[in-house]
Amino acid sequence: MENRVKKAGVAKLEVAGKVVDLPVYSGTVGPNVIDVSKLYAQTGHFTLDPGFTSTGSCESQITFIDGEQGVLLHRGYPIEQLCDKSNFMELCYLLLNGKLPQKTEYDAFLKEVKHHTLLHTQQDRFFDGFRRDSHPMAMLTGAVGGMAAFYPGAVGNEDPAERKLGSIRLIAKMPTIAARCMKYTMGQKFVDPLNKFSYSENFLNMCFSVSAEEYEINPVLARAMDRFFMLHADHEQNESTSTVRLAASSGAHPFAAVAAGVACLWGPSHGGANEAALRQMRAIGSVDNIPEFVRQVKDPSSDIRLMGFGHRVYKNYDPRATVMQKTCHEVLEALDMKDHPQLKVAMELERIALQDEYFVNKKLYPNVDFYSGIILEAMGFPTTMFTVLFALARTVGWVSQLNEMLDDPTQKIGRPRQIYTGEAQRDYVPISAR
C-alpha cells in the first residue's frame, strides 16, 4: 500500500526535563495526528489512552468518518449515494480494490463470488455438534474459524493470490453459513445457494425457502437486505475491525482472524445494539408509555439508557440511520405492516430525542441500530440472528482492512502497552511459612 500521509508540522513535548519533537501528519481529510511511535525510545515514556479514544492505530484508505458532521465515506463515496445508486456486490468490489468496477470487472467479480458460495460437505457436519438451541453467533464463530481447516494454504498470509482467494471465499460463503445457523436452530433442512439469484436474494432464499413450497422473493425485501449489508459493510477502526487487524498482524489465518472479529462483534455494545434497541421498544409497548420511559432515562438514579441513540464516533445524525429509516418504511409498507407498534414508538422517540434539550445537549442522535431491528423482525428474522447478519455484512470490511494492513510496510505485530499498578517485586514465601 502506498503511504499517503503528509508532514504537517512538529509537536513539542516536554517530559522529565527533556523536550522532544514529535512529527505531525495529515491525511486526506480529518484531524491531524501526532506520531508517538518513537516516544519510548526518545523519553522512556509510553502514552496511556484507555479505550484508544485519541489513538490512531494505522493509516487506511478504505473508510472515513466525520462524527461531528455525520459523514461516512467509502473510498471517498458517500454512503447515501452508494445505497441509492449502487448495490452490495459493487460496494464489495470498491472496498477490496479501491475503485468502482467497469462492467467487465463487475461481471467477473460476481461470477467468482458465485463460484465459491457452496460449503464443503464435511463442513455441514460441524453443525451437528451444536445444540439446537445454541445462539447463532456461537455457531457462526465456530464455523468461520473452522473454515481454516479446509483452506490451510492461507496460513501466514504471505501469498497475495491466496489471500485474494480467501477474501472471495469469505464473502461468498458467509451468507451460506449464516443461513445454516438460522435453519439449524429452526430444525429445518439446509438450503443450498442458487447462482441464478443476486447475493441478497440468494441469502433470503437460503433463510426462508422450504422444500414443501416455492419461495417467492419480494424485491422490496431483497433491496432492503442489500441496503442493510451496505450500511454495515465497513466502519473504520471499530472494535471488531481492530480485532481482525490485531489477530492478522500475528500471521494468523485470515479465517481465524475473521472468526476473532465475529466473536468481538457479538458484544451488545457493538453488533448486538439493534437487538437491544428492539427489545427496548417492545418493553415500552406503546406511544402512551414514552413519557414515563423518557423520565426514567433522564433520572440519574435510574439504570435505564436510551438504546439506538448515540454513538462512540458520531456526534451528529448517523448518515446510515437516514437510509435505514427510509428502508424501514418501504419494508413495512410492502408487508402491509404500516401500523407496526414498534415503528410508532420509534418515530415518537426519535421526534422527542431530536427536540428535547436533554438529549440534544448530550448529542444522542439516532444511530443505524435504531431502525434496523424493526426491519429485520418484520422480514422474519429472529432477534438472535441480528448480529449474525451484521457479521455477514461486515465480512467484506474485515477482509479489506486485513489485506490493507498486510500490504502496509509500516505495520507490525500489534502489541499495546500498559501502566502497571500491581505489587512491586517481592520474594516467594513457602506455603508452610505464610
Image: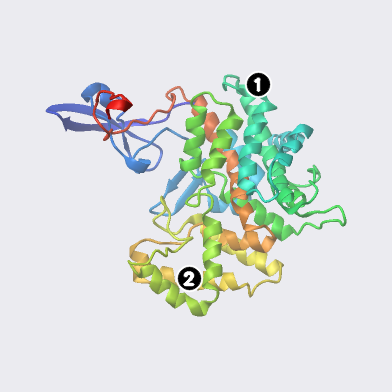
Tell me what residue is drawn at x 35 percent, y 38 percent: 55
Between 55 and 220, the residue placed more toward the observer is 55
Mark 2 burial class by Cα count in 10 Å: few <14, some 14-19, many 20+: many
Between 320 and 186, the one lying in front of the other is 186
Q: Name the amino acid type tagged 1.
A: Gly
> Where does residue 170 sit, x and y in percent of width and height?
65, 35
Q: Which residue is mark 1?
A: 153
Residue located farthest toward the right when viewing the structure as drawn = 212
Lateral position of residue 412 relative to residue 200, left or right: left
Q: Position of residue 153 (x, y in %)?
A: 65, 21
Q: Which residue is at the far bottom?
A: 288
Mark-to-mark CA distance, 2 and 1: 51 Å
Packing grade of label 1 (10 A; few <14, some 14-19, many >=20) is some
The residue drawn where x is 54% and y is 47% is: 266
Q: Which mark is residue 349?
A: 2
The answer to whether residue 288 is above or below residue 141 is below
Q: Amino acid at mark 2?
A: Leu
Q: How many marks?
A: 2
Q: How is the image coloured?
A: rainbow
Residue 113: image location, x then y, percent: 71, 36
Residue at the outermost left position: 17
Q: On the rendered image, what quadrant is the C terminus found in?
A: top left
